[in-house]
Structures are given as C-alpha cells and as structure tokens.
C-alpha cells in the first residue's frame, strides 16, 4: 500500500517548504489548503521536480461540516497516511475586543479544533496500521501569554501542551508525536528588515525539521536564540513575562511570530 505524508496549510510559507523537503526525500504527499487554485500548481510542480505522487484537497478547516466530510473521506479511503503535518493556522493582531468575533472563532476552529480532529482521526488510522508520525506546528508564541495576540498565543499554547501529552499517550502504539516551535520566519511580506535578516527562511526551518523528525525529537526549536527564548518564561516571574511579551508583540505586531 502506498504511503503518504499529509500536510495542512501546504500552499505557502512553512507548509509549502515542508512539502518540498519531504518530496525531495521521495515522499508521496497529500496537500491540504483552502484554495484549489493555489494547491494544484504546487502539486504539479512537486510531481514534476521530484517524481513523487502528489494529491491535493481543497478544504476550509474553519468550517466544521467541510472538515467532517474530509475526515470521513480519509477514514473510508484506502490511502495510508504515515505522517501527518498540522501546519495550517490563523493569526490575529491587536486588541482582542477590537476584532470581529467571527475571525476569532475561525482562528480557534483551525488552530485548535481542526488540528485536534485530524490528530484523532488519523491517529486512530495509524494505530490500526501499526504506527506513524504526527508533527504539530505550535510556536514560540505558545510558551507565554500573548498580549495583543491573545487568542493566537493561547491556541499555540494548546498545541504545545496537547502534542506533548499525545506523545506520552501514543508512544506504545507506535505513533511518534513531535511539536515544532519555529519562532519568527523570514517572509517576503515582512517589512521589518532588521529582524527579518536574523530570521531563518521557511526552507531552512523545513530542512531542520525533517532531520529532527528522523531523530524522533519531541520538541523541535530551530536556532539557539529561539531555544533561549523558549526557556525564558520558565525562569522569569509571570508578571514580567506578561509585560515583556506585551512590549514585544506591540512593537512587532505586523511581523507574525510562528
């Protein structure tokens, strides 16, 4: 039976870079994102460049009914998924009360509920198959409270805690669970050159990540600076962590920290 790596949020950014890194290694892929018109050319290019089978599925993960239909399709299908990469996510910036609730709800649907649903559905399939691997993308935003990006940071804190808990629960089933906290990622949309120059590209993070998956690392944090940043909230008083996080987020609000 052909094996596939399934990646959500695969049409751009880190998700696309992870898809390319896995295709380069000869992995067959199932790519998931909202828009078919962005997925199809990616699938064609990866197939042509690396000679792998690349399937794609347009699905808005913020819509529970569409997600349920997609999950049912996976459960009733015959394709074996031995690697799940939950990379899809949404962000908010600015005061929580200033945002439309619909957008905040979509964020929670994608970052928390869809991720958990896919872990549950595909995790059960992996258990029947005798094992597999799950990679959830959290972020440095999840290691501390996030004033001015409150729901986003809280959702990433959930992903971090949830992933580490699953790793312990599923270890005996042969399912390996890892969580990625990449920190700031270089982006063509960014307008902060000083910080952008010190941030790795999505391709660099993807390469680091697939190597870490080979070693079955529980917590994947690329870069020494980011590892120190992840440690800081454990060493400082909570009131100081909140204050510092608020200052950083207000200053770099347009940046978007993964």
Image (tube, rainbow, N blue to C red):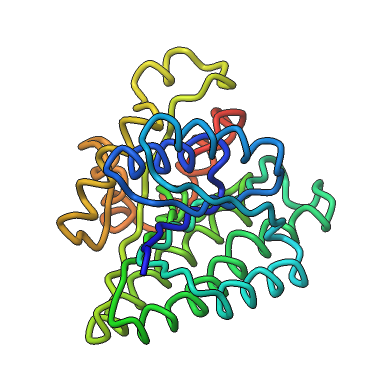
Q: Residue 231 or 26: which is nearer the viewer?
A: 26
Residue 110 x %, y %? 64, 60
Q: In which quarter of the image is residue 227?
A: top left
Quarter of the image with the N terminus is bottom left
At x 42% / y 50%, what residue is drawn?
Answer: 241
Residue 20 x %, y %? 39, 37
Q: Quadrant of residue 177?
A: bottom left
Residue furthest out toward the left: 215
At x 34% / y 21%, what residue is drawn?
Answer: 198
Q: Is residue 237 left or right of residue 58?
A: left
Q: Quadrant of residue 43?
A: top right
Tally of numbered tags: 0
**In the depicted structure, whether residue 141 falls above or below residue 226:** below
**In the depicted structure, whether residue 227 falls above or below residue 172:** above
At x 63% / y 44%, what residue is drawn?
Answer: 148
Q: Is residue 30 left or right of residue 230?
A: right
Residue 28 x %, y %? 39, 51
At x 24% / y 79%, what residue is drawn?
Answer: 174
**In the depicted structure, whether residue 54 falls above or below residue 48:** below
């Amino acid at each position: 039976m052909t094996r596939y790596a399934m990646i959500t949020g695969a049409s751009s950014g880190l998700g696309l870079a992870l898809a390319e890194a896995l295709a380069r290694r000869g992995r067959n892929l199932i790519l998931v994102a909202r828009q078919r018109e962005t997925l199809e050319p990616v699938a064609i290019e990866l197939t042509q460049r690396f000679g792998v089978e690349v399937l794609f599925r347009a699905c808005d993960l913020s819509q529970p009914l569409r997600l349920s239909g997609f999950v049912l399709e996976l459960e009733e299908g015959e394709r074996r998924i031995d690697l799940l990469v939950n990379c899809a996510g949404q962000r908010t910036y600015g005061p929580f009360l200033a945002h439309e609730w619909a957008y905040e709800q979509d964020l929670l649907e994608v970052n928390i509920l869809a991720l958990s649903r896919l872990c549950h559905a595909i995790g059960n399939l992996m258990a029947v198959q005798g094992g597999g691997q799950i990679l959830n993308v959290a972020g440095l935003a999840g290691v501390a409270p996030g004033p001015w990006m409150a729901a986003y940071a809280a959702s990433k804190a959930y992903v971090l805690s949830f992933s580490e808990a699953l790793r312990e629960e599923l270890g005996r089933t042969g399912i390996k669970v890892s969580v990625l906290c990449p920190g700031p990622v270089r982006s063509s949309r960014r307008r902060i050159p000083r910080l952008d120059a010190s941030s790795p590209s999505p391709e660099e993070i993807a390469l680091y990540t697939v190597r870490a998956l080979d070693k079955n690392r529980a917590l994947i944090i690329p870069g020494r600076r980011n590892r120190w940043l992840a440690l800081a909230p454990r060493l400082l008083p909570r009131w100081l962590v909140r204050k510092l996080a608020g200052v950083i987020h207000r200053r770099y609000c347009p940046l978007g920290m993964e």
